[in-house]
Image (tube, rainbow, N blue to C red):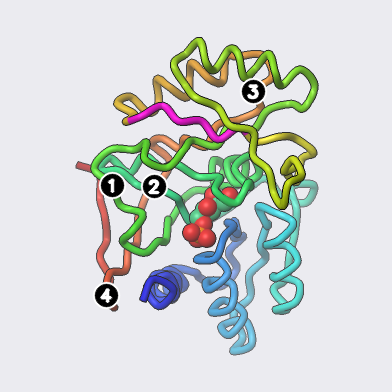
Amino acid sequence: MMSDDKRLAALESVKYIKDGMILGLGSGSTVNWMLRALSERIKEGLRIEGIPSSKKTEKLAKELGIPLTDFSKTTKIDLAIDGADEIDGNLNLIKGGGGSLVREKVVDACADELIIIADSSKVVKQLGAFSLPVEVLPFGFEVTVANIEKLGGIPKLRRKENEIFVSDNGNYILDCSFGTIDGAQALHEKLIRLVGVVETGIFSGMADKVIVARNGEIKFLTRN
Ligand SMILES: O=C[C@H](O)[C@H](O)[C@H](O)COP(=O)(O)O
């Protein structure tokens, strides 16, 4: 089952956590398994401090008794562990299915090491079947929509239960279909230059290790 594989990948990632580390805590259901496993190790005596990448992760971490810190205390993260929506052969990622891409990118980008955990359904030959989440300022988002269309994308304003979805940062998310994405970094660079775009869900060249579980077995992905 997919959720068993998410849990298995998460359990494997916790083995890389060492005493004294500052940890970047990603977001999503796979990361939630990692948080549960981490809290067990903390009960056994492991000392770490985590920086959460979303309000949801912060809430669960607090419930599980995981000690937290923030960027006002340290800008150094030893290891970040995060999930992904798509992973290609070069370990380029699409993230943001849960709407946490901006804080995830801030956290993941300043980590010495980034481990991605996923079930095998996330592994693709080429990115793009999953619409690319792009976080945009609410003010004038219609202009940003038009500009993304000029780049060949089909943006769709994310909604949740009929309301516009608002990110932890108070912004909107445009889920953008570009078909198959050939140059992930090039597309990110075009989008990030558009006025109103806060961040894109393309995480290119950031993952150091990808742990994928498929039917109960663990596989480590490395760059092609
Ligand atoms: O915004 C959400 C994040 O990028 C998640 O890490 C991603 O959507 C994967 O989530 P899940 O582990 O629930 O499949």
Instruction: Look at the image and say whether residue 55 sits in the magenta stretch.
Output: no
Work out whether 30 lies above or below 222: below
- The prevailing secondary structure element of the residues shown in magenta is strand
Specify start and end residues of the magenta stretch as a single range.
174-179
Secondary structure of the residue carrying tag 3 is: strand
Which comes sooner in the sequence, label 2 or label 3?
A: 2
x then y, percent, for residue 43: 64, 87
**Is the Cβ of the residue at disc 2 closer than 8 Å to that at disc 3?**
no
Within 10 Å of the Cα at label 2, are there few (<14), some (14-19), or many (20+) other Cα atoms? Answer: many
**Residue 55, above or below 154:** below
**Marks 1 and 3, how far apart in space?**
26 Å
Q: Amino acid at mark 2?
A: Glu
Asked if the residue under mark 4 is in contact with the one under mark 2, i.e. CB atoms within 8 Å, the reply is no
Residue named by callout 2: 86
The amino acid pointed to by label 1 is: Val
Mark with earlier residue (2, 4): 2
Q: In the drawing, does residue 82 fall left or right of residue 169?
A: left
Q: Which residue is outermost to the bottom?
A: 44
Marks 2 and 4, how far apart in space?
A: 18 Å
| Label drawn at residue 124 | 1
Q: Secondary structure at mark 1?
A: loop
For this orientation, the residue located farthest to the front is 162
* Residue at 71% across, 50% down: 74
Q: Is 73 in front, or is 183? A: 183
